[in-house]
Image (tube, coloured by chain):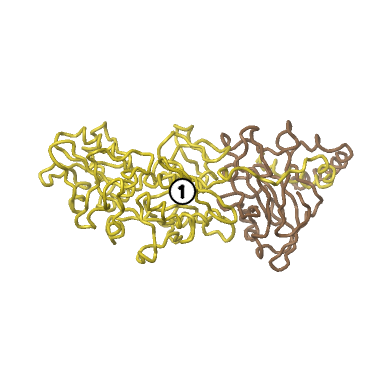
Amino acid sequence: MTPTTGTGTTSFLLKPVGGNPADPTNAYCPGDSATDGYRVQTFLTPASVDPATLTYDVTGPIVPAADAAQQPYTWSLFSINQTQYIAYNTSVNPKGFIDPTQFPFALDILSGLLPTGDYLVGIACSKNGITETYWEQPITITANGAAYAVAVNNGPTPVVPEAPLSVLLPLTGLGAVGVFMLIRRRKATGALAA
Amino acid sequence: MSSLSIKAKLARVTVATVAAGAALASVLPTPSAVHADPKQYSALQGVGSDTIEALGNALSGFSGTQAYTPITSGAPSYSLYSSWDALGTACITTKTGGPSFTRPNGSGQGARALSRAIDAGGFGNAACGGVKDVSGQIDFARSSSGPSGTGTALTYVPFARDGVSFAYYRASGGPAVTSLTKTQLTALFTVGPQLIDGVNIIGCGIQTGSGTYTFWNSSVGATASTEATATTDCNNLLGAGVRAQENDGAALKARGDAAPAGTQVVIGFSAAAFIAKSNLVTADPAPPAGVGIGSISDFGGSPVAGTAPNLTPNSAFYTLAGGFGRYVYNVVSTARIDALVGNTEIKGLFKGPNSAVCTADATVSKFGFLPLDSATYPSLLNCGDSSLKAPLSSGQI
């Protein structure tokens, strides 16, 4: 996400990648809008909400019932001109391509509505309103009256949901990621088994 | 279940990528947020009513043979208004990259298409590849009929007034009957053909997706069932049960020419559409010779004044309480027009007396409608009023 810090009036941009091994520097939905029914959605939600559980309607992202308390803090992204990014179409050719430059966003329109805390912003591919894939970026929002300070809180990385990581990463980074994922997978397996 | 597993895996990978963030960023191009794409690509897309389509085209920038200044939502987004005709190619694609789906014909189908864009329930038929997900593809529906049912998902935003009377045509046997009472019209559209002033008059049916069909039935006291029975003779003149496209003078003439000698045919007809077509401001031809719009003698008289190509609305007819005047609407998602924040496109185009549609009085008047001017007509709804709610309209077409 660029820039990595800003205020409520800063225009930020996400740069998701993944979804098409043949084009690892861009992002793709699993299918297109014209024939496969996918839509590109955007979200901002408290970090405690799993973006995989979000659904989408004409108002934007909807949290599951278990997270109902977080709905007031869950929104689509808005442009600096207050355009709400909901249910955009993918490209037909390349099929499923997402153009992230369509979604520069700012938070000033939500002034006074977001308490200080950790959030996730991102882009999702939905089908019939259900999240199919998504890209997320953790950020910290500090509310100061009606103003916000915004900081990417895990470094300047875009979030990659799928395999292209192994193609993209320099070898030095790849080794570190592999070790980290192995540890995470063991933990997750244990949790699922339990 | 497998899908859930994939999502969980994606979330874990998400966390893992953080460690390699700096390296990843170093190999990615920096995208540009600068946009210079035409505003037409982000225009709000509307479908539905035939009656309002010529005006909708003008608000979009071109109607008939004339260019107009396109309306926009104003600051900050300056979104354009884009309007699809009720008839044309069978299938339409309203937004770049979106599905090709069945063109909604009339207010009823327009409201259903908008409803499916809201609930992602799918809209269309086999003519365009079946039912398609139209979510995100339709932003508003033109409607010449008002809200009905209990619910709040849709908002009907009035922006002008129209009048509906009967259009007539008599191919032979003498002059047509040009003035009827409401009682006579009720008989024609609930019972069947009537002998009036020595002329056999038969009522013709409007295609049932039309808002004019709905309004006309309501005005003359007909139900769908009684109207269907009463218009059977006319609807069988060009084939079995063939109803006419609304506001189509040529369609009425064709039925009159096929009727027994001396018979007069009549049909509900938008006065605004009659004016606009007679004044040659639409892409459609003027009503054929012999096709006129009649007076309702006990409810405001003639809906029009003057002669073509300078016909004007009779405001008394259009505004008569309990008469044959009606509002015309843009229908939008309530969640959007009443949104706490954002949606400035919808609000700027439609909501309130200062919205773009409500300040386009000259264009609205040119197409035979009466602008809703609260100073002149204090008893009418204000232009841009967003208090009229309705449920989503069910169905796939």
Asked if residue A99 lies left or right of residue B190, the reply is right
Whether residue A168 sits left or right of residue A32 in the image: it is right
Q: Compare residues A32 and B321 and report the one nearer the observer.
A: B321
Image height of B155 relative to B36, above or below: below
x and y, in percent, of residue B326 in the image: 33, 55
Residue appearing at x 48%, y 46% in the figure: B60
Residue B132 location in percent, x, y?
Answer: 51, 38
Q: Quadrant of residue B379?
A: bottom left
Residue B32, position in %: x, y? Answer: 72, 44
Chain letter of the residue beneath label 1 in the structure image: B
**Can you name the residue that lies furthest to the left here?**
B198
Q: Residue furthest bottom?
A: A145
Q: Quadrant of residue A164?
A: top right
Residue at (16, 46) in percent of width and height: B177
**Which lettered chain is shown in brown?**
A
| Residue at 74% across, 59% down | A7
Q: Residues within 10 Å of mark 1 (few under 14, many from 20)?
A: many
Residue A119's spot in the image, x, y percent?
Answer: 72, 56
Q: What residue is pinned by disc 1?
A: B59
- The amino acid at mark 1 is Leu
- Give the mark count: 1
B153, B136: nearer the viewer: B136
Chain B visual colour: yellow
Task: Give me the residue at 55% from left, 59% from top.
Answer: B339
Q: Secondary structure at mark 1?
A: helix
Q: Name, please, the residue furthest toward the right.
A: A172
Q: Nearer the viewer, residue B175 or B3?
A: B175
Q: Is residue B5 left or right of residue B237?
A: right
